[in-house]
Image (tube, rainbow, N blue to C red):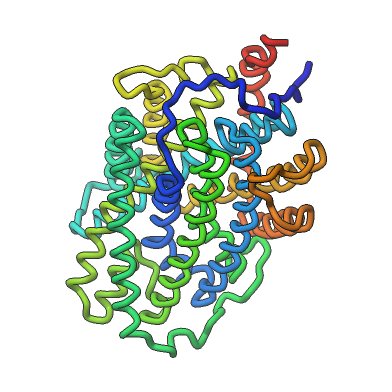
Amino acid sequence: MNIFRKKPFSMENEKLERVRRLKSMDLVFLGLGSMVGTGVFTLTGRAAATVAGPSLIVSIIVASVAIGFSALIFSEFASRIPAQGGPYGYLYTLFGEFPAWIAGTLLMIEFFTGLSVTASGWGSYIKGLLGLHLPAVINGPLGTASHFSIDLIPVLIIIAITLLGFLGTHTMLRFNRVLVVLKLVALAIFIIAGLFFLNPDNWQNFAPFGWTSIFSGKGMLAGASLMFMAFLGFETISVSSEETKDPEHAIPSGIMGALFITAIIYILVTLVLTGMVHYTQLDVSDVLAFALRSVGLTWLGNIISIVALFTLLTVGITMSYALVQTLYGISRDGLLPKKLSRLSGKYRVPKNAILLMGILAMLVTGLFSIDRLSGFLNLCTLLYLMMLAVGIIKLRHDYGEPEEGEFRTPFVPFLPIVSLLISFGLLLNYDWITWFVLIILLLLATLFYFGYSYRHSHLRNED
């Protein structure tokens, strides 16, 4: 039994089934759509209030540096192995099929939970903005009511995103670009307005929960672990290789450009937010609007709420796109049912993959809390980023240095080792329940691999 059979290093012989339309700027907007969303509009306040206090600013810097190391590693992979499926495809070439399957599983869990967290955040915003008081049975995840309960509004937004996916990549990403521009304008207005209401006293107790923690979920490093999620989404760029013009150059440019802009936005917003309002008051879902209302700018807070209501959709749009691309890529290799990679309709989209994404995301979104989902998203991403950090060292060992014109990750193997250590440190900040459930999911994925994927793999059939 060969569970480590590998794809060839060169992707030139892979059959191209999608139209290459995306350019570097399209990918930057794709990354911004996924990275600038729930984290800045919702999680910043809660993280400051309950995890890190004003030291969340440092947490974000630590998280951005950590994710920046991973982005450099991603960029070399994308330049040298522009494979369908992003990290899954890279590891298929380097480590073989089963490690790639595990990475693909982690990637799918990340995108599912990212989509669900976005929809849940969107639901909180609309309830707060409209003052909705729904019956308990349709107003929260399991456990909200005495018997069965489901969070209805986030489920409705998942339905809308799923329907948008049927209109094709070009239409979806054009809609995403408009919303991203609107979102960036709103955040710029918040930052400028907030500068006039800064109170340095709000930063006095800068690290009320301490600087470090292990398994406690509190402190600056715990804040970095939580806000790590804010930068997740650049990997949505890497799964778009089959629809990107010149992916060897466009994907690295898109990843690094989107990450740099996102880091600047998060640092500025958190600095202004914790300076306007004392961190103990920030545990609210619509935190930016709340801060503006707290200083008397109610009208502007209402505008920000309305903008956030619409622009949070960008994260859902980009996460759903990345998830469908991942399902499509893994299915093409035979590790998932072939039906998921069938293209159909006017826009040549994998409709079965879109439909599966929508159904599962509705269940996850409606039944599980946003806090638990956030932990899964971060943990899954950290694990496959560690796999890629080891992978870049193996890539250099097996295939040599990048050729002229290809992206080069600096300071290999030093930088990947530092990335590994940072990711490992962040792993220690997740509770045992999150670890336990993730291990169960990975065991189920392993059973699926040996029960179905191994026997239907295209590489096995070729052998």
**Residue 123 visible in rendering:** no
Report the front residue among 462 and 403. Answer: 403
**Residue 21 visible in rendering:** yes
Residue closest to the far bottom:
201
Q: Count up the numbered dots.
A: 0
Task: Tell me if residue 201 comes above or below residue 119 in the rendering.
Answer: below
Residue in view at x 44 percent, y 76 percent: 271
Q: Provide residue 436's location: percent of width, then percent of height.
A: 63, 43
Task: Tell me if residue 461 comes above or below residue 325 in the rendering.
Answer: above
Report the front residue among 204 and 388. Answer: 388
Task: Tell me if residue 445 comes above or below residue 398 in the rendering.
Answer: above
In which image quadrant can residue 390 be found? Answer: top right
Q: Is residue 332 left or right of residue 281?
A: right
In which image quadrant can residue 305 be found? Answer: bottom left
Q: Provide residue 391's location: percent of width, then percent of height.
A: 73, 42
Q: Provide residue 384's location: percent of width, then percent of height.
A: 64, 43
Q: Quadrant of the C terminus?
A: top right
Q: Quadrant of the N terminus?
A: top right
Residue closest to the far right:
397
Task: Tell me if residue 353 comes above or below residue 337 in the rendering.
Answer: below
Q: Provide residue 383's location: percent of width, then percent of height.
A: 65, 46
Residue in view at x 23 percent, y 47 percent: 135
Residue in view at x 69 percent, y 47 percent: 386
Q: Is residue 104 left or right of residue 92?
A: left
Residue in view at x 31 percent, y 55 percent: 124
In which image quadrant can residue 353 be found? Answer: top left
